[in-house]
Amino acid sequence: MSRVTFVAAAAALLAGCGVVHAENHDGGSGSRSFDARGFDRVSLRGSDNVVVRVGGAESVTATGPNDMLDKLEVKVVDGELRIGREKHWGWNWSSNREPTLITVTVPRLRGASIAGSGDMKVDNVQAASFQGSVAGSGNLTIGALQADSASLDVAGSGDTSIAGVAKSIDVSIAGSGNVDARGLKSERAKISIAGSGDVRAAVSGEADVSIIGSGDVDIAGNPRCRVSKMGSGDVRCG
């Protein structure tokens, strides 16, 4: 895509519902605000960092080098806020520049996902169900969750950390990533590992554990564990 074509496309986007405010656009660092509405899930693709604050009116702002902000794409698709950088051949996940920081405020959140090396931190979640996923080396942190059920998926080397309360949790790891749910009190758990990733959890009732590989599972509390494993992985219950 030529620069003229790119600029024309960017202008069309800004005229719609993209960037609505910019500061210090030429050189150096700046900030942008994005007009994004009607989402309860946040998806990050790439190497940028995202902070999600739950409980206020919807807003999306970004700070960082202006040339990186120029390449940032923020859009809402089917109730999901998608943050990334797009080239004509697909998502551009790599950059040797300083990552931007995107701050998202949303009234309610029921899903958070990362694809790439960026990190996402969510302060709190109150929902009937919550789904968190990491694909790549990025890290996902959930400060305080209150939910009936929570699903946590890791594919790659990224880590997930979560605290709070959930009646049931479903944790799946494919790769070397880890899930630290010691601060998440749950009544039931289903844990599956294929690879070398580790899981730490706190369960008061039934826990189904499946391991294929060298990953370890450590469950605190007074769980009743059913274990199936192939490989050198260990399971510690209670």
Image (spheres, helix red, strand yellow):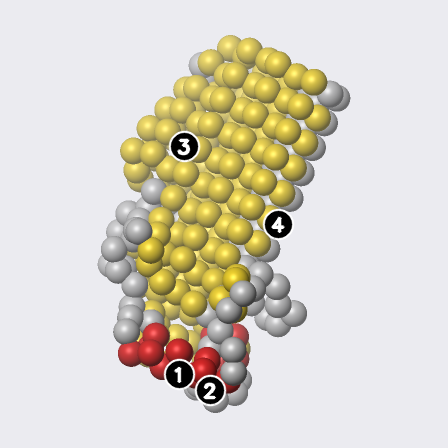
Mark 2 lies on residue: 4
Name the spot of residue 61 as percent of width and height, x first: 38, 68
Q: Tags 4 and 1 in contact by the CB under 8 Å rule?
A: no
Precedes in sequence: disc 4 or disc 2: 2
Name the spot of residue 42 as percent of width and height, x first: 39, 52
Q: How far apart are marks 2 and 1 (CA)?
A: 6 Å
Tag of residue 150: 3
Tell me the element at label 3: strand
Q: Distance between the residues labelled 4 and 3?
A: 21 Å
Mark 1 lies on residue: 8
Dot 4: few (<14), some (14–19), or many (≥20) neighbours within 10 Å?
many
Name the spot of residue 5 as percent of width and height, x first: 45, 82
Q: Distance between the residues labelled 2 and 3?
A: 46 Å
Q: Nearer the viewer, mark 4 or mark 2?
A: 2
Precedes in sequence: disc 3 or disc 1: 1
Q: Tags 3 and 1 in contact by the CB under 8 Å rule?
A: no
Q: What residue type is labelled 1?
A: Ala
Horizontal side of residue 56 vs 94, given as left or right:
left
9 vs 173, nearest the viewer? 9
Tell me the element at label 4: loop
Mark 4 lies on residue: 137
Q: In this view, does 97 lie above or below 78?
A: below
Precedes in sequence: disc 4 or disc 3: 4
Q: What residue type is labelled 2?
A: Val
